[in-house]
Amino acid sequence: MPAKPKVSVDTLSYDHLDGKLVIEGLTAGFGPKTALENISMSIKENAVTAIIGPSGCGKSTLLRCLNRMHEVALGGWAKGRVLLDDQDIYSSSADPVSVRRRVGMVFQKPNPFPTMSVFDNVAAGLRFNGVGNRSTLTSTVEDCLRKVFLWDEVKDRINESGASLSGGQQQRLCIARALAVEPEVVLMDEPCSALDPVATAKIEELIAKLKETYTVVVVTHNMQQAARVSDLTGFLYLGKLIEYGPTQQIFSNPHNELTERYISGKFG
């Protein structure tokens, strides 16, 4: 087995950017295991930030720390600060439910509520937050389905089960569900890994459109996808942020030898 590449951290944190999310000294793990070590980076508003790196490097853990989903996992813990509009989401006064409403999450595998209709899937978060007016629900559901380019495909199936849709449609339905509660940030954890190329292209088109309104962070194992959809890219290895900067620079002229070796396929 080849030796693991030596870690030499040369992080570009982009602190000068006005970050919608600013991560300061974030360390996180599960029980005695540390999965992330001293991560600091600024997530730019109305941009797509991609997080890349080999399996097990901490990509999904980082993403889940950004809306406090990580602490829900068995033994999950986090230290450091994550600032959302200059407010620390880990402060004692922060409400995790409120944080997750402002920072939405889309998971790797499409997970529509199988016993709910297409309509009720999108409306679920609204109802949870006390919205009961049928007119408001109807207009919001249609608006969110249009945002994810799904309305024309499902408008005649609005009362059918969300689980009856194709895989790509289910993923867009889950994104519409996340958008319904009006988040400011949308986190996507490998959103295309279970999809075919046609569905993947639609999700990538959607990601490009979403950044007009939202701040988007995407974890992906597909480096070509990161290069296509993102404005900024962070490379994680063994729980450390090795390099972070504009996507074009990361892929064409990385500053760190480890980044270059990963992008060129020499390990990973």
Image (cartoon, grey):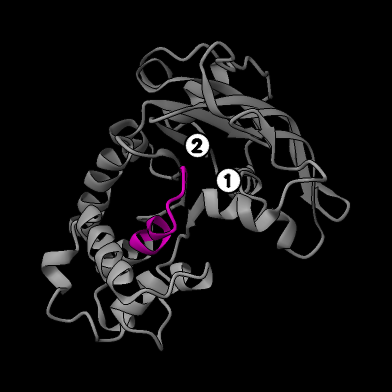
For disc 1, the marked residue is: 63
The nearer-to-camera label among 1 and 2 is 1
Corner quadrant of residue 166 = bottom left
- Pinpoint residue 188: horizontal percent, then vertical percent: 45, 50
Task: Tell me the kind of residue under disc 1.
Answer: Leu
Q: Does the magenta stretch include residue 73?
A: no
Label 2: element kind: strand
Whether tag 1 and tag 2 are in contact, CB under 8 A, the answer is yes
**Magenta residues, as a range?**
175-185
Corner quadrant of residue 143 = bottom left
Corner quadrant of residue 140 = bottom left
- Indicate whether 261 appears above or below 81: above
Rendered residue at 74%/56% (across/down): 71
Residue 140 visible to the viewer: yes
- Look at the image and tell me in which quarter the N terminus lies: top right
For disc 2, the marked residue is: 51
Neighbourhood count class around disc 2 (C-alpha, 10 Å): few under 14, some 14–19, many 20 upward:
many
The residue closer to the viewer here, 189 or 210, is 210
Rendered residue at 12%/79% (across/down): 156
